[in-house]
Structure formats: C-alpha cells, structure tokens
Image (tube, grey):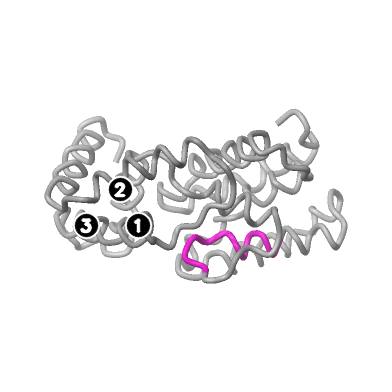
C-alpha cells in the first residue's frame, strides 16, 4: 500500500468508498477492502510487475454499481469509473481503458478470460477464501434477491450456488499461485459433499451472526 499515490488514495477513500453504503453487506466496503488487500497479496506473492495505482483503483471501483443491477454490475461499475473525470489527473487514456476492461472482466461467471493481468488480479482477489465469508455472503445476497424467502430456502439456494461456483469443475477461475485459496477450496469442497451437513453449518453460523447482531 506504500506505493499508492496518496492523493489518489485520499480521493477514493473520500468519494468512492462512501458509495458502497448503498450495496448489501456482502458487496459493501468491507468486501472492497478485502479485495484491495487480496489484490496486493497476489501481486507480492507472485512478484507481478504492475502499476499499484491501477490495481488499487480497479479493486476500489469493481462493485460500485452492484446496488443498481447486480446481474450486470461489472458493466455498470466500469461505466461509473470511466465517467469519473477526476481520474484523469492520475491516469493516461490507455491506463483508464485497461482499468475499465479489468472491472468489466472481474466477474467469476464470465465465460471469457480477463483481457489483462489487471483483470486477472482483481478477478482472483474477488474470490472468497474463507468458508465463513461464503456462508454470510450467499445468505445476505439471497435475502436481497428474495426478501420473502425463508432461511431454509436461502440455505438450499446457497448450497446450489456454491456448488456451481467452487465445486469440482466449478466456474470460479483463479489465475495465480495462492496458498490461501487452495486451502479454502479443499475446505469448501469438503463441506459441500453432503447437503444436510452444509445446511446445518450455515444455519448455525447465520444464527450466531444474528445473535451477535451482525445481520
């Protein structure tokens, strides 16, 4: 984080981060901070030669349009970024093009590989790497999609979603060496082997969060 332009960092913290209050908790500011931190972990672990300001900006904007349309949020987020004329102070037109494409390319379910190393970094960093985060995010996102759904319906939906995403042959792709993600995959795949065990685990965890008033 020491290599990031301080003026850029201050601008994003003051003008971009507050926008994440409009998103549901699974795509809020805590998630953005997580993706920023994970992006730089991947850069360091893999010794990637990249522009840190670009990595930071892509991660900071990548979900900003999620509250508008979750199904097309990557396109909306890229458009919001590209309309921010304040970024012209920090980046060239070519750099802004790469930033926009990386935001468009970050989604796990995308059928195409990201067009640049920047898209691959943030796409990889955007993957969950703890089971607890999966249990919380699938619940809160499912609740937003269907506020009238029962918890049991949401748990079954989450089991389905996570199986398609992280199960053997799942669509979530990863482009770099990452010990944390490899350990996470083993853990989540083990949990997903038995539906009843998965549902019980998520039920207990969500109830714990409710008791702690974190949901």
For label 3, count other residues whose C-alpha is less than 10 Å away and answer few (under 14), some (14-19) or many (20+): many
Image quarter of the C terminus:
top left
Q: Residue at x 24, y 50 (%)?
A: 192
Q: Secondary structure at mark 3?
A: helix
On residue 154, which mark appears? 3
Circle 3/circle 1 CB separation < 8 Å: no
Q: Position of residue 169 (x, y in %)?
A: 38, 61
Q: Residue beneath label 1, please?
A: 168
Q: Secondary structure at mark 2?
A: helix
Up-down relation of residue 115 to residue 28 (above or below): below
Which quadrant of the structure image shows residue 92?
bottom right
Q: Position of residue 91 (x, y in %)?
A: 84, 53
- Magenta stretch, residue numbers: 100-110
Image quarter of the N terminus:
top right
In this rendering, would 63 be left or right of 129? right
Q: Position of residue 69 (x, y in %)?
A: 47, 68
Q: Residue beneath label 2, please?
A: 189
Circle 2/circle 1 CB separation < 8 Å: yes
């Amino acid at each position: 984080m020491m290599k990031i332009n301080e003026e850029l960092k201050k601008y994003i913290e003051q003008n971009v981060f507050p926008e994440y209050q409009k998103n549901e908790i699974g795509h809020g500011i805590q998630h953005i901070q997580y993706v920023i931190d994970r992006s730089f972990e991947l850069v360091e672990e893999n010794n990637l030669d990249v522009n840190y300001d670009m990595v930071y900006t892509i991660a900071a904007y990548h979900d900003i349009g999620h509250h508008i349309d979750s199904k097309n949020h990557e396109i909306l987020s890229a458009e919001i970024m590209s309309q921010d004329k304040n970024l012209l102070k920090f980046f060239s037109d070519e750099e802004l093009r790469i930033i926009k494409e990386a935001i468009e390319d970050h989604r796990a379910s995308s059928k195409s590989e990201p067009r640049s190393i920047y898209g691959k970094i943030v796409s990889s960093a955007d993957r969950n790497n703890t089971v607890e985060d999966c249990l919380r995010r699938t619940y809160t996102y499912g609740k937003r999609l269907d506020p009238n759904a029962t918890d049991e319906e949401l748990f079954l939906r989450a089991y389905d979603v996570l199986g398609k995403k992280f199960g053997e042959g799942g669509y979530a792709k990863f482009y770099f060496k990452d010990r944390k993600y490899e350990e996470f995959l083993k853990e989540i795949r083990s949990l997903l082997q038995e539906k009843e065990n998965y549902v019980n685990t998520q039920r207990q965890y969500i109830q714990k969060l409710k008791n702690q008033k974190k949901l």
